[in-house]
Image (cartoon, rainbow, N blue to C red):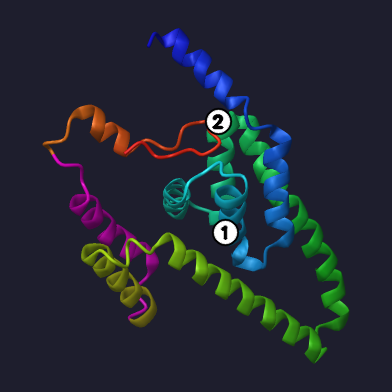
Amino acid sequence: MPPSDIASESAAAASVVGLFDLFKLFFMAGALSFGGGVVAYEREYLVRDSKWLSDEDFLATLEISETLPGLNSINIAVIVGDNLRGIPGAIASVLGLMIPGVVIVMVLGVLWASNHHNPRINAFLLGIAASAVGMLTVVTLQLGRRQFTNLLDLAIVIVTFAATSIFKVPLAFVLFVLGPIAIFLYRPSASLPRSMTEELHMPFHRGEHHGKLRH
């Protein structure tokens, strides 16, 4: 396909998802989520409701987000928005995700200043924390089910968990040690054609309603 046709096809695909649709989706995720549970809501809306991403796409996006500085939820918004609508999409997604949180935190901060000694308030916050942990656990099981059935994947998960949670090894050190090892173990086979090797590392297509990784 000539480069001009590819460019026009990409431009047409990018116009499928509206900026307001991106803003609204992430606004809902930011307004309804509980703490770290925002990632669970993002998956719910992006994969199940809008079907803009597949589970594999979302997992790949989450993996990239975890290697970058900042909150995973914000990183996901930037990556998804940019892939679907470029820089304007990234801006719309981030604004949609942050606005409700900023407003709610400011309002709750004022209320907390005068009610933080109330045991019912503390109990309510503990309940929210428990909900967030539960939602993240569900997302982990849904996205990581294949990793739990592969012995090599499971070994890396166990080693990472033991290092960070049991032996209290700094996360940065764990990443610097296990990262290169994982890259070496999962490196593309030298026998694969060049085109296939490149496709294994490409993100989901910009603008597709159900972007599937090209395996």
Indicate the quadrant where residue 17 lies.
Answer: top right
Name the one closer to the observer, 186 or 179: 186
Please state the horizontal and vertical placement of residue 188, each as a whole percent of the image: 20, 42
What's the residue at 43%, 60% (across, down)? 143
Magenta span main SS:
helix
Q: Is residue 43 above or below residue 113?
A: above
Crowdedness of circle 2 by 10 Å Cα count: few (<14), some, many (20+)? many
Please state the horizontal and vertical placement of residue 194, each as a whole percent of the image: 20, 28
| Circle 1 residue | 39
As helix, strand or loop, the secondary structure at mark 2 comes to loop
For the residues labelled 1 and 2, the Cα–Cα distance comes to 21 Å
Residue furthest toward the left?
A: 191
Please state the horizontal and vertical placement of residue 89, each as a whole percent of the image: 63, 34
Q: Per the image, is 16 magenta?
A: no
Q: Per the image, is 188 magenta?
A: yes
Residue extent of the magenta highlight = 167-189
Crowdedness of circle 1 by 10 Å Cα count: few (<14), some, many (20+)? many
As helix, strand or loop, the secondary structure at mark 1 comes to helix
Quadrant location of the C terminus?
Answer: top left
Q: Nearer the N terminus, badge 1 or badge 2? A: 1
What's the residue at 17%, 30% (across, down)? 193
Indicate the quadrant where residue 128 lies.
Answer: bottom right
In front: label 1 or label 2: 2
